[in-house]
Each structure stands twice: as C-alpha cells, then as structure tokens.
Amino acid sequence: MQKIVRVIAFSAIAASTVLMASGCSVARDQQTVGSYMDDTTITTAVKAKMAEDKQVSATSIRVETLNGVVQLSGFAKSETEKNRAAEIARTTRNVREVRNSIVVQP
C-alpha cells in the first residue's frame, strides 16, 4: 500500500514539473503554468498576512493576482483597514502592483 502511495506522489510531482517546464497555457489570457503558480503563491502569501493582522478582516477582503498585480476587493470597516490591506499586499514578495478596489462601509 505504501509503495502505491509513493508511486502516485512521485507521478504527481513529475507531472507538475513537466507542466511548469513546458510553459503550457492554463487560461484564456495565455498565462503560463509557471506564472500562474507564482500568482497563486502571491495570493496565498497576501491572504496569510491579512489573516495574521489584527487590523484587517481577511474574510471580508478578496485577493486576486495576475502577473504579479494584486487586485483587492470587498469591504472594509474603515479607511485605515483599507489602507492596511493595501500595505500588506504591497510589501509581499514579488508583488509588482496593487489595485485597491476595497469599499469602505460604515
């Protein structure tokens, strides 16, 4: 049983390596697998930092990344929270630009 699990895990790693190396398109905008993985890593890092921050409600703010550009949307309770979310995104590694579309709701 453990041998089968190892074979499946090795196959999954090998397949993902081949996909990343080949530069296949994964979306309509022709983004490569490598850049898609980079964007996913950025999005995850921004969300994790927001979850740790006491000033930001991570569940109310949506984070999307495309080619290193982070798009923030959703709702904040104050201008301070909105600005803090943008600061978190801006200081995250590999972020090229931040577009802050968060709406402040009283």
Image (cartoon, rainbow, N blue to C red):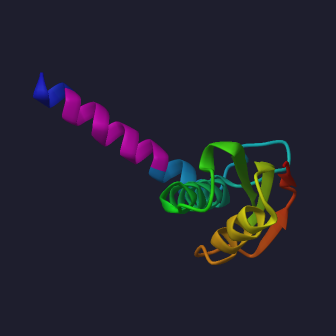
User: Residue 67, percent across and down?
Assistant: 75, 64
Look at the image and tell me whether residue 100 can be seen. Answer: yes
Residue that sits furthest to the top in the current view? 1
Left/right of residue 67 with respect to residue 48 in the rendered view: right
Magenta part of the protein: which range? Answer: 5-16
User: Residue 70, percent across and down?
Assistant: 75, 62
User: Residue 81, percent across and down?
Assistant: 71, 63
Left/right of residue 66 with respect to residue 58 in the rendered view: right
- Given residues 100 and 66, the one toward you in this image is 100
Q: Is residue 15 magenta?
A: yes
Look at the image and tell me whether residue 68 can be seen. Answer: no
Q: Quadrant of the N terminus?
A: top left
- Given residues 102 and 4, the one toward you in this image is 102
Left/right of residue 18 with respect to residue 83 in the rendered view: left
- Given residues 60 and 2, the one toward you in this image is 60
User: Residue 76, percent across and down?
Assistant: 76, 52
**Residue 98 falls in image quadrant:** bottom right
Q: Main secondary structure of the magenta part?
A: helix
Residue that sits furthest to the left in the current view? 2
Residue that sits furthest to the front in the current view? 106
**Residue 42 falls in image quadrant:** bottom right
Q: Is residue 69 magenta?
A: no
**Residue at image point 39% right, 46% down:** 14
**Residue at image point 69% right, 64% down:** 85
